[in-house]
Image (spheres, grey):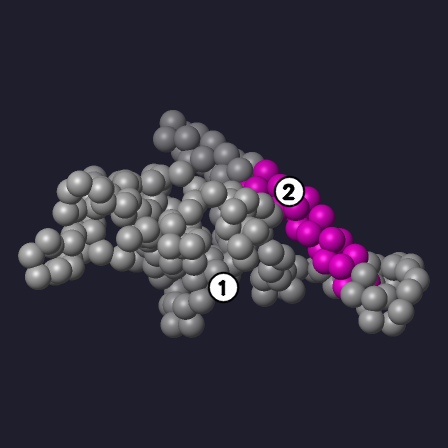
Amino acid sequence: MGGGGRKFTYFSDVGCKLGKLDRFLICPNFMFAFPSASIVALPREHSDHSPIFLMTEVADFGSRPFRLFNSWLLRDDFDVIMRLAWSNYIGVGAPDRYFFDKLKAVKEAIKNWRRVEFDKENRKLRELKDLVNNIELVAENRPLTNAEIEGRRLNKQRILDLEKFAKLDLIQKAKIKWVCDGDENSPFFHNYLKIKNRKCHIHGLMIKDIWTTDVDAIKKEA
């Protein structure tokens, strides 16, 4: 769990001893419900212990930086989108500025394509799972026909094909090079990814020796 504020939570008046006590008792599902939770040590006043505050609120720093996933390159229409965006761009200005604007236009085209395709894939995935589920419900009451058996097999294969891309994205996000078949669906893999996300998340910033979680103040300091 990430944290911030004071480095030490205990300051002894005898011998100036420092200590860190920043543990919370939580239920096993807490980190699944609040993966970006953090602990903040508040300023101590009359006590020798700093109050510690458990935060579950996630600071919104705006849109995330663009990131290209390797799985996109495996899709048939990615090359078409790239070529069209590159060749159809019309701009003016100095060569370096023209090149920058052209790359920006290509990026926007990819983002728009991915947004549309992501929604399509999710809808298709839900439809395929519903079809497979309905066939399996029918099988509980009567024998399936050859067409239904073949339809279930083909739909399950389509589901695996669509989920393959999502698994590749998860592997790239986690930056684990040793993932084997099946690991991407294990609790360990998902826990690893959540721990990595928590470590990379900005919970706050020390500004003039004061712990600050205000988004605008952090952006201004950065």
32, 10: nearer the viewer: 10
Which numbered marker is on residue 172? Answer: 1
| Residue 31 left/right relative to 95 | left
Q: Is residue 194 visible to the viewer in this orientation of the structure?
A: no
Q: Residues within 10 Å of mark 1 (few under 14, many from 20)?
A: some
| Residue 100 left/right relative to 21 | right
Residue type marked 1 = Gln
Q: Position of residue 165 (x, y in %)?
A: 54, 57
88, 203: nearer the viewer: 203
Q: Nearer the viewer, mark 2 or mark 1?
A: 1
| Residue 52 left/right relative to 117 | left
Magenta residue span = 102-125
Q: Residue furthest left?
A: 14
Identify the residue at horizontal 57%, vertical 51% (top origin): 220
Q: Quadrant of the C terminus?
A: bottom right
Identify the residue at horizontal 74%, vertical 53% (top origin): 108
